[in-house]
Amino acid sequence: MDLVVATYSVTAKRQKIVGFAGPYYIAHQDILVRADDNSISRPSDLLGKKVCSGQGSASGDRIESLYGSKVNLIRLPGYGDCVNQLLGGQVQAVTTDNTILAGFAAQPQNQGKLKVVGTFFSNEVYGIGLKKGDTRGVSAVDKALQDMFSDGSWRSALTKELPQVPAGSPPVIGKFNIPFKQ
């Protein structure tokens, strides 16, 4: 594999073993609930609730570090599994990046059934993973990203593919440590 292009958050742990180009987007951890559930409007509302996140996800790790055992965190292999549990009533919420959650809420079979709460409680800096030490590859990908930022194709793609998530400004290439502001 030459590149990992996905909703791939740059973390200190990953930077030890993966080279990163970008970032190409700054997402935010958020919460997905059933459309008729108004009991969860901020992260602290997850206390005492069954919450699902993906196995090995930074989002699940963040919930554990913030709330420990005060949240009943369930980790499943994929977010589709979590969404099925949410729709079935086995969990009260799913947490991960707003981009992923918005995609699930927008699926035709889920429209009107799910909503993204809209409470950002982290920055998820998306980078493109390359082999550790591949400086030539990182430079080439960084240049391609900068070209997309400059010519407007980055914004056009985001607006088309994720209309429910504001594109914002393109991130600064090479800046992975972005302090979260509430």
Image: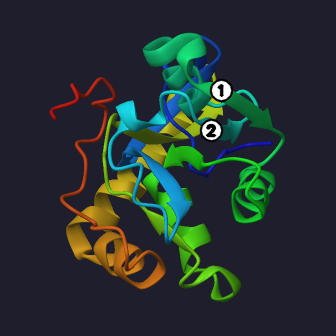
Locate residue 87, reporting x and y percent.
72, 65
Residue 96, picture quadrant: top right
Seen at 33% across and 36% down, the residue is 123
Give the labeled residue for mark 2: 51
Locate residue 104, reporting x and y percent.
61, 69
In the rendered structure, the answer to whether residue 120 lies left or right of residue 98 reads left
Pick the residue in front: 143 or 176.
Answer: 176
- Calculate the distance from the C-alpha at mark 2 to the C-alpha at mark 1: 6 Å
The C terminus lies in which quarter of the figure?
A: top left
Residue 145, picture quadrant: bottom left
Pick the residue in front: 8 or 110.
Answer: 110
Q: Looking at the picture, does residue 98 appear above or below residue 66?
A: below
Query: Which of marks 1 and 2 precedes in the sequence?
Result: 2
User: Is residue 12 visible from the viewing direction of this image?
Assistant: no
Neighbours of disc 1 within 10 Å: few (<14), some (14-19), many (20+): some
Q: Amino acid at mark 2?
A: Val
Pick the residue in front: 96 or 133.
Answer: 96
Pick the residue in front: 159 or 138.
Answer: 159
Give the labeled residue for mark 1: 72
User: Is residue 120 visible from the viewing direction of this image?
Assistant: yes
The N terminus lies in which quarter of the figure?
A: top right
Query: Dot 2 lies on which element?
Result: strand
Q: Amino acid at mark 1?
A: Asn
Whether label 2 touches label 1, CB < 8 Å: yes
In the rendered structure, the answer to whether residue 56 lies left or right of residue 129 reads right
The mark total stands at 2
